[in-house]
Amino acid sequence: MKYGEEEKSMETPTASKNSTMAWAVLSKAVNGRSEVIKVTNCDEADRAVQENPGMLYKAGPFLL
């Protein structure tokens, strides 16, 4: 590495024309492990969590 150059440990994702924002609906931890139930849009993830607030939560956004 040359003087003045910075090492990047994580690259920042950049959106492209084909990128889509998504959210994951996950089950709340059972025995310390959560499971992904579905990957969807924000509105559908919100609805799923509202219907089952004690069992589900959402994570995101992330790029697909």
Image (cartoon, rainbow, N blue to C red):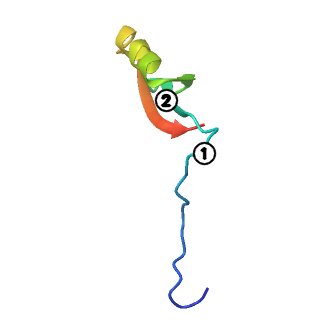
Report the residue at 56% width, 46% height from top: 15
Report the residue at 55% width, 60% height from top: 11
Report the residue at 54% width, 69% height from top: 8
| Amino acid type, label 2 | Trp
Q: How many marks?
A: 2
* Residue 30 seen by the camera: no
Q: Position of residue 26 (x, y in %)?
A: 49, 24
Q: Is residue 37 shown left or right of residue 54?
A: right
- Residue extending furthest toward the top: 51
User: Mark 1 or mark 2, which has the lower sequence index?
Assistant: 1
Mark sitting on residue 2: none
Q: Position of residue 64 (x, y in %)?
A: 60, 37
Q: Position of residue 43 (x, y in %)?
A: 42, 19
At numbered mark 1, what does the secondary structure look like: helix, strand or loop?
loop
The residue tagged 2 is: 23
| Residue 52 higher or lower than 3, as above or below | above
